[in-house]
Image (cartoon, rainbow, N blue to C red):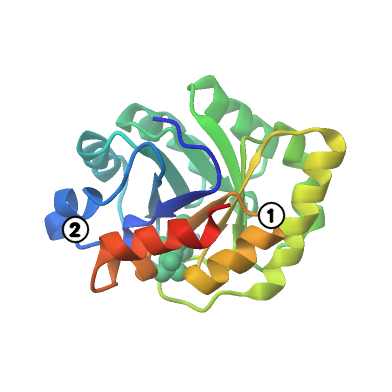
Amino acid sequence: MTATPPIVAPSILSADFSRLEAELAIVDPARDWVHCDVMDNHFVPNLTFGPIVVGAVRKLTRATLDVHLMMERPWLMVDEFRAAGADHITVHLEACRETREVLRQIRATGAKAGLALKPATPYAAIAPYLPDLDLLLVMTVEPGFGGQAFMPEMMDKVSAARDLRAKKNLSFVIEVDGGIAEDTARTARAAGADVLVAGNSVFRATDARAALAGLRAAIAG
Ligand code: DX5
Ligand code: ZN
């Protein structure tokens, strides 16, 4: 299912997995993506899920599945995540050795290829890969956990990527991930973000459906 930017991507990391079907029912496949955070307890100090759960999510929604791999040696599992139903597969620059080869491998599966950078990784490290990307993921918290505070200083990376995209006529989308609520969503959107991942502000809200609608409205127009 395709959505056009600006897009909100609720992150199931903050959802109640005992009632995932009901949690995912708030997602509108025509407008939203579903963000799946894969953590391996090596690349980040937390452990979540793998292709089995991504496959279950695939059965529960027609929305674009945006799979964020916070894992070492991600290239070993690209095919499995694609087979499970991932539409986008994003790997971390810090976890790759042959980055271009990993991006090519993702594209060869038919998935869109994304590259993520941690807060400490400078824009200059990712800039050479921008022509090879479908998606750039700028982390706005330290990867590993939901519910952390947004780092506004990451907006320089977002704006630099947006400016380079315009200058070189490239077409990757820019996603921000971490600490997104209505106020920070507006900040990130103004800096150039096209896709806003939101975990706690959606799934830990009293009314998740209303929270998602509020985020959509905050970045509309
Ligand atoms: C953090 C994950 C995020 C996380 C964001 O490592 O990559 O996708 O779900 O959660 P919030 O929106 O609560 O900061
Ligand atoms: Zn994420």
Residue 171 at x, y = what percent? 70, 34
Nearest to the eye among marks 1 and 2: give it.
1
> Seen in the image, is 217 located left or right of residue 156?
left
Q: Amino acid at mark 1?
A: Gly
Residue 34 at x, y = what percent? 37, 47
**Which quarter of the image is occupied by the N terminus?**
top left
Q: Residue at x 16, y 48 (%)?
A: 21
Q: Earlier in the sequence, mark 1 or mark 2?
A: 2
> Seen in the image, is 96 located left or right of residue 17?
right
The picture quadrant where one finds residue 17 is bottom left
Q: Amino acid at mark 2?
A: Phe
Q: Residue at x 47, y 49 (%)?
A: 68
Q: What residue does disc 2 label?
A: 17
Q: What residue does disc 1 label?
A: 192
The picture quadrant where one finds residue 212 is bottom left
Work out which residue is located at the far left of the displayed protein and give it. 18
Residue 29 at x, y = what percent? 34, 38
